[in-house]
Image (spheres, rainbow, N blue to C red):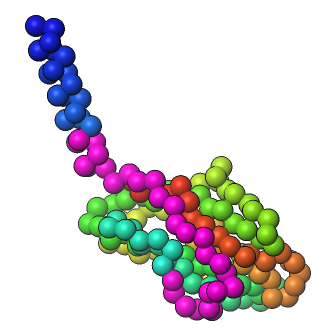
Amino acid sequence: MKRNFTMLYSFLLGILFLAANTTSQAQDLTAPYFEINSLRLDENFIVFENDFIKISAQKKDYRNDADGIWHERIEFSYENKTTNALQIEFSRELVYNNKTYASDANRFKISLSSKEIKTANQTIRDKAFYIFSKDHKQTIKTQLTHFQIKNTIVL
């Protein structure tokens, strides 16, 4: 009797494990480092892509004369490739003038509806959509040399 119960228990645990792993899209993903100097202005590049999501970016000039801002930044676009709503959570590692700033404690979250694409634009101030790269006015002396999207979880 005890052996039958143990087999049944193991079987049920196996089914629960299988169900959890086939219905969830949770993944822990890390993209490669991107060297900023190798990227051309306004050229799209894919940061990360799998069956569920696509994260792409562009090096852009950002100008806001009212605030006295003229700088270069990396702007991101997040695409849900599925027919289900999902959420992307991630952190970043940024390297400015060869000094690494890891933001593991500062996680970013993007929620996307079915087949939705969210892209950086002039009105979005959410830092999940851009990274400061350099100041064209040279007021800020540090410059981004590398970045990495890491510890990405798709739910």
User: Quick one: 119 or 6, which is closer to the camera?
Assistant: 6
Name the outermost residue toward the front.
Answer: 3
Seen at 69% across and 57% down, the residue is: 102
- Above/below status of 105 relative to 64: above
User: Quick one: 148 or 108, which is closer to the camera?
Assistant: 148
> Is residue 19 among the parts visible in the rendering?
yes
- Above/below status of 71 relative to 151: below
Residue 155 position, x and y percent, is 39, 53
Q: Quadrant of residue 60?
A: bottom right
- Above/below status of 70 relative to 16: below
Which stretch appears magenta? 18-45
Residue 16 position, x and y percent, is 23, 35
Seen at 72% across and 76% down, the residue is: 145
Residue 31 position, x and y percent, is 52, 66
> Is residue 66 among the parts visible in the rendering?
no
Q: Is residue 41 magenta?
A: yes
Seen at 81% across and 73% down, the residue is: 97
Q: How many marks?
A: 0
* Side of 5 relative to 51 (left or right): left
Q: Quadrant of residue 7?
A: top left
Q: Quadrant of the N terminus?
A: top left
Residue 8 position, x and y percent, is 14, 21
